[in-house]
Amino acid sequence: MKNKILGLPKAAVIVIGIVITALFLVLMNLVGGVVAHLTSIADSYTLQLIAEIGVAIYAIGMLFLMGYQQSLKKTGVGFLRGFYIGGFMVGYCVYVAVAQLFLQSVSGSDGVRSAGGIMIYILTMFLVGMNEEVIMRGIVLNLFADRFSNTRRGVLAAIILSSVIFGAAHIPNVLSGVPLSSALIQALQATLLGVLFAAIYLRSGNLWICIIIHALVDFGGLMASGIFGNGDMTDMIGSLSVLNLVVTVPLFLVPCIVLLRRSKLDEIVEMREGEIIIPSEREGENIATVSLVLGILGIVTGFVGYGAGFGLVGLLGAICSKKIKPQQNGTATAALVTSIIGLVIAALMITAIMFLMPVLGDTSTLESIMNQ
């Protein structure tokens, strides 16, 4: 079927990509609606999990039908280098998770969902990441990239068009009760995230990197409801405002530009032509330098807990650099050490803050300590 579709005009291929995405959304809402109508399940994440299981069958089936099943088997540049390529998103996921933990501590609320509820939440986030990446990057992006010319312009067109479709696919959240303004903000954010995920996938050649990072993004963003039981998924999405857009647009746009700069677009074109890109020692040195800077930032910001993201990405980069240039790479060694120190400091501070915040927020406990 893939070959027949690729023989169609570009406009027809784009329409097919939209239809594949639309069917995914229709099936999602249909399964969720039927389950909600036929059962007494009230938990939004349980309903979402059932719906995700249903559409997983569609997503995987469509992946095989379109002939892109190999995208789940290819590891491309490997997991280590793949996560480094997606380092910004790895660090962002850590930052969001830490921020959610701090906010929970400051709020003084000690409510936590049951172990079963948390497991359902984790499985739901994984399936959301897997299903959306299989459909949007595994099928739609690959389909567009195969149909458009394998040039910088063609690759960019495939990335942008598939990402716009990905963003627009979030607007139907209004059917779940999300305000239109919040749904539009989420759609714009998702479009930029789509560009990031597409860049990570095409540069790493590993769809599982995107699946894992996508799941972690959703996990961190919805922790307040999924872990601590503060509202539900609709409440979290409905809380998005213009302020979120002001912050996230430049935050996501910069790494998009970095990941898709001219030289890296050329590498993507070469990889799609079957060439194996072997990193040079110069690139290994550059990675080591960046990792050292991240390690130092990890130490500096580790004292407020947020250094965990810098430290983790610095650690990934240092190991990558060591593999590229194993000899006479003192910068990578320094990056390795500083990154580990930053991670340790951040872990200790996160633990301390998690224990101290509830105590400091409880004035009666504080007074009893002061009176002793």
Image (cartoon, rainbow, N blue to C red):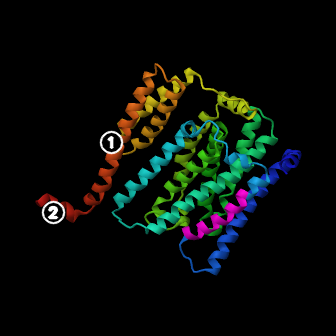
| Mark 2 surroundings within 10 Å by alpha-carbon count, few (fewer than 14), some (14 through 19), many (20 or more) | few
- Relative placement, left or right, of 150 versus 268 is right
Q: Residue at x 65, y 71 (%)?
A: 32
Q: Which mark is residue 368?
A: 2
Quadrant for the C terminus, please: bottom left
Which residues are the magenta region? 45-60
> How many numbered callouts?
2
**Most common SS among magenta residues:** helix
Q: Tell me which residue sits at (53%, 39%) in the image.
A: 87
Q: Which mark is residue 218?
A: none
For marks 2 and 1 on the same chain, the one whose residue lies earlier in the sequence: 1
Q: Nearer the viewer, residue 306 or 171?
A: 306
**Residue type, mark 1 in image:** Phe
Measuring 38% from the left and 36% from the top, which residue is drawn there?
340
Amino acid at pointer 2 = Ser
Residue 17 position (above or below residue 337)? below
According to the picture, the residue beneath numbered tag 1 turns out to be: 303
| Residue 54 on the magenta segment | yes
Residue 59 position (above or below residue 339):
below
